């Protein structure tokens, strides 16, 4: 193969390998976000700000439901990465062939929950009546195809654990074009509004799932997927659950705090909801640029811990922290300066919604590098096979701080504003990053000491 798709995580120049591995993950994340960005931009241009609010208001509750199962893909990635680092061919095979049915079962469960209870969840969040019906339609169609998202995420996690970050990028470049084209057709030609963008997302994700499955089937190494050998292997399933379930619980609990925040946003009305939805989508592009280093720290640490190269694993942690800080500051300043222009792309018909979107971006942008550093520290801990500790820290540091803030400071009349609400994010990032970094070095020293005996 002319294109070198894999990165050797346990040998070679570390900084160059980290950058080579991370850039495709960043680009892949950007393409994934284009799915939702295309949804919002197209409905904003052709259907108005109410439709933007309808699509945007679903993200918090959707993430709450989905993250629990998506977290298991983290466990799959770590299981494969550590097996590759240890050069255990049989364990690699078992981990991969356990991951796929786990994704399928998770997808079926999510489909049932999402399709059955979408409208109920939205009502619990206080979604306004003029937005509710559109939001429910979007959610039901989205969850009808959630199995494709599960398959894609699990298979992509396996490819990344094997050092291949380029294949997912190629696949999403293809499906991103499909998604945008279908968005335009369904909304402008068939006048399907939010149902059209949901269908476009589902179809494009199905294509992505098929492509990533074929990539694993066509491999010639221990990571080759053989459909006839798919089954649950007890030891590997336990490892996936042990690492992935706490990660999923953490993601879901993060989403609980975001649901509570979204409910608070909803209380300010549809204009604030529209501005918040557009700003949140812009932040998503910032997030994937930084979260790519979380994926890198997770898999590089996993392989080097599997290979018992502890000093190299520590260098991975420090290099990823340095990179995410520098890139985070650059991205934050860029978005801060371009915030108004970016929001007008999403909200051409509502100056008031743009103004409220600016409030969110200006409060969160300049602190966003802290989120990236927090994710690197958590990913490094999970790469070492430790998942409960970062989950507990994150639940207390993120959920605890934000929920506590909402029910105390935010309830004071003079502080009952969107500005006060957004301030809780940066505070929670600082606390969580500090605690996870301390936990990382304690865990690292323990593992290194045990291995030296």
Image: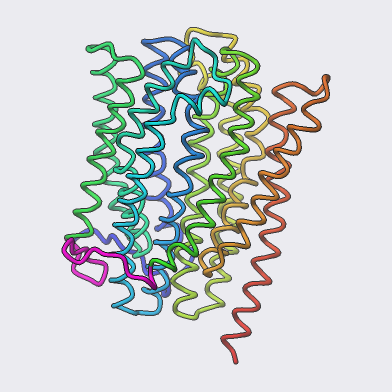
Image point (35%, 54%), residue name: 154
Question: Looking at the image, is 123 positioned above or below residue 237?
Answer: above
Which residue is most to the bottom? Answer: 453
Image point (54%, 51%), residue name: 249
In the image, 199 versus 216, the foreground residue is 199
The magenta region covers 218-236
Q: Is residue 15 magenta?
A: no
In the image, 202 versus 141, the foreground residue is 141
Q: Is residue 291 visible?
A: yes
Quadrant of the rendered image containing residue 315: bottom right
Question: Looking at the image, is 188 positioned above or below residue 324?
Answer: above
Q: Is residue 224 magenta?
A: yes
In the image, 401 versus 256, the foreground residue is 256
Question: Looking at the image, is 36 positioned above or below residue 195?
Answer: below
Q: Could you say where residue 83 lies in the image, as x and y percent from the top left?
A: 38, 74
Image point (59%, 43%), residue name: 254
In the image, 33 versus 446, the foreground residue is 446
Quadrant of the rendered image containing residue 235: bottom left
Q: Is residue 31 visible?
A: no
Question: Looking at the image, is 141 positioned above or below residue 90?
Answer: above
- Asked if residue 48 lies left or right of residue 111, the reply is right
Image point (62%, 34%), residue name: 365
The C terminus is located in which quarter?
bottom right
The N terminus is located in which quarter?
bottom left
Q: Could you say where residue 90 lies in the image, as x and y percent from the top left?
A: 29, 77
């Amino acid at each position: 193969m002319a294109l070198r798709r894999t990165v050797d995580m346990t040998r070679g120049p570390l900084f160059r390998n980290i950058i080579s591995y991370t850039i495709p993950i960043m680009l892949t994340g950007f393409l994934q976000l284009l799915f939702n960005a295309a949804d919002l931009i197209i409905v904003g241009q052709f259907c108005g700000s109410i439709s933007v609010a309808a699509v945007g208001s679903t993200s918090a509750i959707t993430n709450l439901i989905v993250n629990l199962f998506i977290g298991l893909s983290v466990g799959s990635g770590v299981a494969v990465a550590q097996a590759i680092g240890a050069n255990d061919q049989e364990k690699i095979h078992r981990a991969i062939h356990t991951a796929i049915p786990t994704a399928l079962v998770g997808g079926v469960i999510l489909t049932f929950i999402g399709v059955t209870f979408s409208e109920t969840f939205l009502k619990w969040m206080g979604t306004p009546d003029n937005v509710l019906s559109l939001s429910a339609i979007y959610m039901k169609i989205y969850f009808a195809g959630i199995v494709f998202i599960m398959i894609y995420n699990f298979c992509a996690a396996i490819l990344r654990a094997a050092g291949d970050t380029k294949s997912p990028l190629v696949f999403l470049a293809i499906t991103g074009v499909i998604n945008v084209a279908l968005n335009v057709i369904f909304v402008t030609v068939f006048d399907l509004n939010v149902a059209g963008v949901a269908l476009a997302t589902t179809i494009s994700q199905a294509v992505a799932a098929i492509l990533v499955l074929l990539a694993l089937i066509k491999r010639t190494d221990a990571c080759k997927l053989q459909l006839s050998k798919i089954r649950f292997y007890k030891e590997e399933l336990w490892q996936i659950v042990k690492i992935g379930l706490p990660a999923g619980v953490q993601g879901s609990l993060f989403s609980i705090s975001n649901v509570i925040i979204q409910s608070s946003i909803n209380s300010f009305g549809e204009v604030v909801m529209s501005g918040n939805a557009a700003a949140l989508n812009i932040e998503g592009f910032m997030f994937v640029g930084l979260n790519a280093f979380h994926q890198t720290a997770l898999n590089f640490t996993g392989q080097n811990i599997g290979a018992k190269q502890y000093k190299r694993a520590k260098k991975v942690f420090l290099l990823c922290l340095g990179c995410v800080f520098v890139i985070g500051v650059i991205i934050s300043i860029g978005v801060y300066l371009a915030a108004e222009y970016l929001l007008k792309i999403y909200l051409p018909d509502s100056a008031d919604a743009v103004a409220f979107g600016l409030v969110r971006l200006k409060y969160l942008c300049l602190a966003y590098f802290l989120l990236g550093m927090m994710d690197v520290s958590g990913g490094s801990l999970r790469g070492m096979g430790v998942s409960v500790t970062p989950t507990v820290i994150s639940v207390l540091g993120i959920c605890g701080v934000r929920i506590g803030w909402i029910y105390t400071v935010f309830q004071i009349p003079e502080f009952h504003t969107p500005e006060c609400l957004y301030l809780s994010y940066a505070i929670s990032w600082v606390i969580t990053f500090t605690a996870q970094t301390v936990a990382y070095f304690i865990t690292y020293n323990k593992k290194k000491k045990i291995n030296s005996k």
